[in-house]
Image (cartoon, coloured by chain):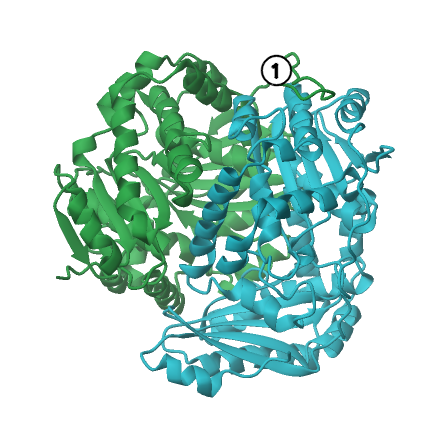
Amino acid sequence: MTVAGAPPRPAPGPTRAYRFPAFERLTLSNGLSVVVAPVAKLPIVTVVALVDGGAAGDPREYEGVAQLTARLLAEGTERSDGAQLAERFERLGTALDTGTDWDSSTAHVTVTPNRLPEALALIAEVLRTPSFAEREVDRLKQERLAELLQQQTEPRGLADDMFGRFVYAAESRYAIPDGGLVSTVGAVTRDSVLGFFHSRYAPSSTTVIVVGDVTLASAQAMVSDSFGGWAGPVVPRVAISDQPATLTRTVHVVGKADAPQSELRVGHVGVPRLHPDFFPIVVMNAILGGLFSSRINLNLREEHAYTYGAFSSFDWRRGAGPFTVGTAVRSDITDAAVKEILLEIDRMRSTEVTDAELSLATSYLDGVFPIRFESTTAIANALASLVTYGLPEDYFDRYRANIRSVTAAQVLQAARAHLHADQLQIVTVGDPAVVRAPLEALSVGPIRTYDAEGNVSV
Amino acid sequence: MQLPIDTFRLPNGLFVTLSEDHTAPLVAANLWYHVGSANEREGRTGFAHLFEHMLFQGSANVAANEHFELVQRAGGTLNGSTWLDRTNYFETVPSNQLALALWLEADRMGRLLPAMTQQKLDTQRDVVKNERRWSVDNQPYGTWWEKLPALAFPPSHPFHHSLIGSMEDLTAASLEDVAQFFATYYTPDNAVLSIAGDFDPAEARRLVEEYFAAISRGGDRPPLPPMHVPATFGEWRREVVHDTVMLPRLYLAFRSPVFGSDDYYAASVAGAILGMRRGSRLHRALVRDRQVAAEATAFTFDLPKGSDLLVVDVTARPGIEPEQLEEEVAREIDTLQAGGVTEAEIERAIALIETDFISSMQAAGERADKLSLFATYFGDPRLLNEQVARYHRVRAQDVNEFAQQRLGPDNRASLLYVPRTDDAEALDAATLATTDA
């Protein structure tokens, strides 16, 4: 249909080639890895120091120590206290960002190329001689405890944390938030931070990634100058438990009195990042809830107007991260929204997706690939994931062909193998007075009620 | 760093900016319409934003839900956003799909109304009500971004009322409102189109002419109520908000020079000295040294007319009373005003701002958006290339003059969030300061 006078819908022009930036890897004699990707677009360089020391390696009862350790890196070295260190970075026009995910910890800066040598030397100082001053350890513990306190009235973060707890067995590290809980963060001392640091941070467990307006040789020389003298032990990989809490579909109501919306998380233990079904799962998830035009978003938002948005995701980790459907819906239709989510998961498992759905997902994931890597930070983070998961060197070169080759039959097979409708944990943070009875009437599983701190309530 | 920038204007008034970059096969298209919540009529708060949602519901040659699907099928990303004084629509696509992006934008600029139905409006109304619940009503401190402008601008001012809108006004919005708003504001002479990335300029111009040239110019637009306000509040306005939060938080606003003016850059640097990153004064004093705050930042709204706002945002540590939080923040502001800033602080702030700016310009979508911004507000997208230099011209004396004129007790508006207690209702009546009406 074309309205008279309107120009016809255009066809695409010829595709232009794109290649993920070429990168070189190098190992220094002390075991430290270096990855350099020269990208000459704007006068800017990103450095990511990636350490194999994520939250999955937290010792039992000290969960949160990996995150505190990473945060404390920015709070002082043997040479400079925290305030001086911040000043030294910021005079270079950058700020040191440190953080932790499940598998690794990172220190990140983005600077103009003229300041790169100084910035690299400063990052090396931070990794090699952190002070972990008692006062700063205590302050950052208090700040984490403040975050946890805030979370009690912040429904999104609360729903995420509660979901992890209900999906994973108590012995799995994934059952507790990566930043830890009040009891475990409270237990952390300067000694436990030092213990974690010395057991996980060493040249052999560290990769320095440099991306941007820099030559290969100069970047390698600068990293070598700054990090070459660092000595340390070989760090073993940590074992990860990713066992589920239960195989019984269960409804969990976390109370937030008078909440006008229910935050919903529905899912179960997913699959590890290195899995032969990775590409079919990515395409399957895009169709189910990964895209704006996915089944779940079109159903919950555009058809029923239950929500501002609804999505699904597989959280990729070395162990099996969760599969999650997430949304926030008007309180009084919480049960109806859960019903539609379960219906879409069942539909995904019952019949093949249409050609139109498959081609939308694959052409989106294929076409958007260059757009994901416009910035030096995005490229550095992609290279960090390559290192963390041990992906093949040509992973990014083959990514688009791998996506395009996924078939409808593979999508169905992935849905049947990796979506477990009978094991879903259905978590809602909402007003129990409004949502509990209708969810019970839905009869999708036993129902449990908790307060905002996760205590069982009656 | 200088970006290449070209411009032209179609006879119907559409202003176009082009900025080439062939480092990757992708291109961004970005449209700014010079209309925002400021243009809403009485009883229709939230309508500019609800209308933005309607622009994704199809047009004469685009079916419902097809707009998103076509761009995503092409391998592109897209969205839109509504602000006090503008609404933008944008997509980044593989460079061989530029024609599709422009055609979609032209179809909804020229031929939106045939696709509008009551059912679509009702659905998007409910989606937006859920957006309000999600971002404002069910979020700790979520009401700040309607309470602060209400405190800082008088009721007659177009920036006073809520951008997301009240539930009642959203309910009242009709298809007739959609038609009228579209005819008044969504015209080529009230829009700027920016294209950044990998494209051929002659081909881009040909496409723009083919798709947009036949769209008619608009008529007269109703003038906005007067935007001018005095340079200072003339008092310290206070509002206490009892909310479902665990920790007190203070939003302290100052009227500040409008975005783009010479004095704006001094204000922006003052904001960075106070609250940008860990080396800033508020972080050092309140988070690190005295440990009365868990977080401390500062930012400007970047409003180009009437008055801008510089806002300090500080959250208390557990155990710190709201009154103490306010005193501690005020003391830091007073210290800056009395003692001034150092050249070293200026250098730190400008170095951080410059790196952030260069870094952000890596994304074609961000370039296109900023080109549209400078073209819409000042009629000159080339101002984008002057931003870093304008920051570098700021001296300690400029910041100190700004502090003298604008950071005093006669130019403060504070929104203090206090954890709700059982008797909060009674407290409300006792402590809620009056705001000027």
Tell me the colour chain A is drawn in: green
Question: Which residue sits at x=38%, y=16%?
Answer: A354
* Secondary element at image label 1: loop
Question: Which residue sits at x=43%, y=53%?
Answer: B134
Q: Is residue A29 visible?
A: yes
Residue of label 1:
A17
Question: Which residue sits at x=67%, y=52%?
Answer: B36
Going by the image, does A55 lie left or right of B383? left
| Residue B352, position as x, y percentages in the image | 64, 54
| Residue A179, position as x, y percentages in the image | 32, 53
| Residue A43, position as x, y percentages in the image | 69, 38
Figure quadrant of residue A434: bottom left
Tell me the colour chain B is drawn in: cyan
- Residue A196 in the image: above or below residue B12: below
Q: What residue type is labelled 1?
A: Ala
| Residue B58, position as x, y percentages in the image | 58, 31
Q: Nearer the viewer, residue A119 or A213?
A: A213
Q: Mark 1 lies on which chain?
A: A
